[in-house]
Image: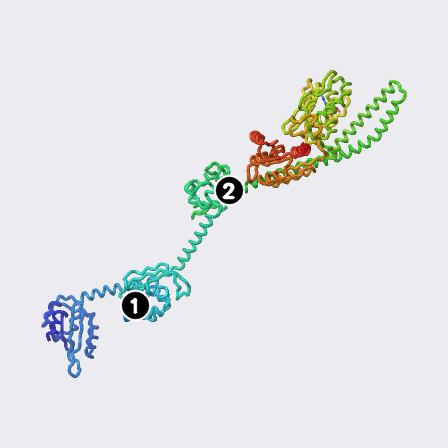
Amino acid sequence: DLRYRLLAENVIDVIAAGDNGGRVTWISPSVATVLGWRPEQLVGSLWADLVHPDDRERLREVQDGLLHGKSARLEARVRRTSGEHLWMNIRVKPVLDDNGAVVARIAGMWDAENEHQAGEALARTEARYGAALSAKRDPHVFLDAVRGDDGTIVDFVYADANAAALSWLGRTLEELQERSLLTAFPGHRASGMFDAYVRTVETGEQLVEDERRLRSEILGTDAWFDFRGIQVLDGLSLSWRDVTTKVKTRNEIAEADERHRLLAENASDVVFRVFADGTVDWVVGSVAELLGRNDDDIRGHSALDLFVAEDLGDLEGTGVRLRHGETVVDTVRVMRPDGTHRWVSRRMRAVMADDGEHAAWYVLAISDAQAQVENQRALEESERQAQDLAQRYARARNEALDASREKTVFLSRMSHELRTPLNAILGFAQLLAMDELTVDQADAVHQIRTGGRHLLELISEVLDISRIESGRLSLSMESVAVADAVNEALDLVRPLADAAGVRVGRVDGAACVAQVWADRQRVIQVLLNLLSNGAKYNHRGGTVEVFCEPLPGELLAIRVRDSGPGLSADQIGHIFEPFDRLGAERTDIEGTGIGLTLSEALARLRSGRLEVSSEPGVGSVFSLVLPSSALRTGDIGVDEVEEVTPTLGGTAHVLYVEDNPANTHLMERIAGLRPGVRLTLAPNGALGLDAAMRDTPDLVLLDLHLPDMRGETVLSRLREMPGMHGVRIVVVTADASAGLAQRLTGLGADAVLTKPIDVGEVLGWFDRTIGGSGS
Ligand code: ADP
């Protein structure tokens, strides 16, 4: 048969025939080329002897099958003449007779060496691949495409799956194989994953889907997956990984970062991260506002350089505390590039290195504390003032209570008790004097009367002092024309001076053409005391002169200068002590040693003072210093002075521009001491100007440190207001340098008072204003 021959020679390497006994009956000549045997060498030999011993078992199975009419395929090693074996593919078919009995068999054989080796390689690859796939932790499946009539992919079926995929899908391989993807997971269509699979198969492009958010049909919740797929044959190899935790964590971190960023950018704080060596790693927050710098000026520089060195204190100690895990909080100043300082509150914390001993870096947060520090300072200052004042009150009160109460009660009772018998003594002495008396008797009566009058004077002075000390001395305050008071006192002292041979008088000059705010009678009383001392403690032909001198702060000194013996510094130290006559008790000069004590107390009582200066052998000057009540002493003549004497208990509108509540409270208390004062408070410059505009004050007390505008500005504006030209403006400030005082005076201030304010000084201004309110 030609067809068999062509087949045998061109396609199949060897063709053979055999009998039922397993022997070769015929074999094609090509066997020589393939195996080296000549055909006649093989005819009659057993097939079993020709194949490799390891393959004989399989051969026998095939031969058994042939006996039952079954065709078979077999791969077996066939021996060559060289003794080697060659892998051959053998196909055998039975040959049947007309009755269907097996009579012979025919075999086609061809060289399968290459095929066999490729098969082995494939098996190895498959073994390795299978191992790799099953070892893979990510689920991995093979899907085969299911195509419709028009050739388009309509579904996939599972072809294979690794262990991870099976456990993920909850199926065994048998359950899964050949199952429809879309039936098992219909959601694949809606999510677009099905289309992605189709695209991969149709285009051969790799499928990469990272962080696909899907509603997991297995988990029943939203989850994130990474998918990887490649086209394999008419299907795809697909693996996936659940990255939900990773995505969620990352989103949370991003959210937290965003929150921190917002916080950092919007907080008024500045936060630094500082390396262990003190250089700044990064800085966030309101850097420009607080530090006056930008981030780049700070990053990489030493954090310490930002602060005022002297505020930082014990750096080493702070380092130790930080490394012990303490959060260190302090208040320090930052240095801004423009040279200004700003108070900030600072929080520091160390983040420790793994060794637990060294700081890996520091976190430093600062926030503005300028206003806080200023308020604290102001509070402390006003507290100090309030305390100071309270102490002074308490001291004065205790002194008055302890020292004076008993003494005063005793003295006033004594004086009263003494007066009654003194009345009798003086009365009867006068009666006696009317009788006819001898010279000796008359002298005795004179002595009694002189002694009696002296005693009466003493008693009334003692009473005055006790009244002053107990605060019960009532004064009639008024604007007193100095010239008048001086003249009156001079008139009163003249008889005594004449008797002593001393000339008394007033030095002419404009200075005494002024007014003081005082109790007229008491002024005369003090002047009389000074003048009579000047006359008493003098020599015949000596002089006593009165002259006046204006002093800074609207004060006026009325000075009494004598040509007496003068006083030593030691004597001056004791001169105001009651009953101390400094040795005059050993002379025959009359006196009690209490006149100057009383005069000094009277002067002080009305915001004035009594001063002494003396040069032994030349004379003494005693000065009564009192607040002047006229604004410009030089402008007022003597005649006018007399006309402007105001009514007793005048009123004054005082405007106090001050923001500190403690200070305003103090001022209210001081104003409370003067019923005539009506106090208006303004907490800032603008309100102060408003208040002055609405109700023109008689006196303005102006704090320089105001929250809204500079005190100097307020001062100039006040001066420019209509009706404010002649109003007194007194500036109250904590730092009165000479330069500042001069500048303020130039702007129109009448005076500058320094804090802590002196109550007496303020009262002086009130009194002068009350006295001068009519002028
Ligand atoms: P007296 O009643 O003794 O005058 P004063 O209190 O007025 O009491 O004065 C106290 C003492 O001061 C006097 O005793 C005298 O020694 C001294 N003294 C007062 N004024 C003068 C003066 N102008 N010159 C010298 N000594 C004076």
Secondary structure of residue under mark 1:
strand
- Asked whether 465 or 1 is in front, the reply is 465
Residue closest to the far top: 541
**x then y, percent, for residue 129:** 28, 63
The image shows a total of numbered marks equal to 2
Q: What residue is at 31 percent from the left and 69 percent from the top?
A: 154
**Is residue 519 placed above or below 358 in the rendered structure?**
above
Q: Residues within 10 Å of mark 2 (few under 14, many from 20)?
A: many
Does residue 703 appear left or right of residue 153 in this picture? Answer: right
Residue at image mark 2: 344
**x then y, percent, for residue 105:** 16, 77
- Asked whether 656 or 739 is in front, the reply is 656
Q: Quadrant of the N terminus?
A: bottom left
**Is residue 223 placed above or below 379 in the rendered structure?**
below
**x then y, percent, for residue 746:** 57, 30
Residue closest to the far bottom: 99
Q: What residue is at 60 percent from the left and 32 percent from the top?
A: 749
Secondary structure of residue under mark 2:
strand
- Asked whether 456 or 659 is in front, the reply is 659
- Whether residue 277 is visible to the viewer of this picture, yes or no, is no
